[in-house]
Amino acid sequence: MNKLRVLMYHKVHVNRRDYLTVDVHQLKEQLVYLQKHYQIIRLSELIAHIKHGQELPENALLITFDDGFSNNYELAYPVFKAMQIPFAIFLVADFIGKKHLYDGDYQEFLSAQQLTEMQELVEYGLHSYSHQDLMNLPENLWNTEIRKCISFLESLPIPVQKAWAYTYGSYPRHNNELIEKLNLALESNQVACAFRIGNRVNNIPLKAPFYIERIDVKGHKSMLSFKLKVRFGKLF
């Protein structure tokens, strides 16, 4: 059975590693390994597979970043560009070009100009309007949050892929009624697919395109741990 692996990164730093951050050397080492062992695809290729049945290569792997930190342009993009590896960034609409108090610190986010400069290699998806956890919003506001995110990002001079990444990986687990309502909110806004965390490898064909699992890349883990996690997913 064919497989799809989706990696989730957040931040890149010159020399710091933590649960949300890889350093530049570590990123290069990981990309060399991925390029050798997997077929790295674009987000648009996955959407074409879901919507139109376009075939994915064996060992397909999609690289994604969440939130849209400015270091994705300053530090990650040069590495990807030098190796000609595509990746996707899921953007928080209200963070574009701003400095926000986030994770207990003021952090800078990608500007419209930076997004434009990267667009030949980078594709952009949806990560909410204001980084709200949908599960903390009333159901009648889910559609509003999705629609506002799409509307704002589509006003920028970049193509936007109709793919959603759940903030905090949060979705209505084990509640079929809420899952159906969330699916309807996404479908009504022409969203083709959505991503949770899960840390598992996905089987192709996808059984639940609104709940594609991603593998969370943590900077404080070893290269061996990274290789095993990418290959097998969560081991327990």
Image (tube, helix red, strand yellow):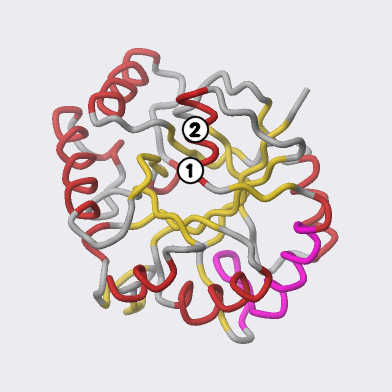
Q: Which residue is mark 1?
A: 44
Task: Name the element at disc 1.
Answer: helix
Q: Nearer the viewer, residue 137 or 43?
A: 43
- Occupied quadrant, residue 187: top left
Residue located 46% across and 75% down the image = 73
Residue located 24% across and 54% down the image = 153
Residue located 27% across and 71% down the image = 112
Q: Is residue 115 positioned above or below 215 on the image?
A: below
Please give left or right for residue 76 compared with residue 114 in the image. Answer: right
Q: Amino acid at mark 1?
A: Ser
Image location of residue 184, percent across then percent down? 28, 20
Q: Amino acid at mark 2?
A: Ala
Q: Which residue is mark 2?
A: 48
Q: Nearer the viewer, residue 16 or 152?
A: 152
- Residue 139 lies in the magenta stretch: no
Quadrant placement of the N terminus: top right
- Residue 34 lies in the magenta stretch: yes
Image location of residue 127, percent across then percent down? 35, 50
Please give left or right for residue 90 compared with residue 197 in the image. Answer: left
Residue located 39% across and 31% down the image = 192
Q: Are marks 1 and 2 in contact (CB under 8 Å)?
A: yes
Please give left or right for residue 134 compared with residue 213 in the image. Answer: left
Q: Nearer the viewer, residue 195 or 192?
A: 192
Task: Name the element at disc 2.
Answer: helix
Neighbours of disc 1 within 10 Å: few (<14), some (14-19), many (20+): some
Neighbours of disc 2 within 10 Å: few (<14), some (14-19), many (20+): some
Quadrant placement of the C terminus: top right
Region in magenta = 16-35
Give the Cα distance between marks 1 and 2.
6 Å
Marking on residue 195: none
- Occupied quadrant, residue 101: bottom left
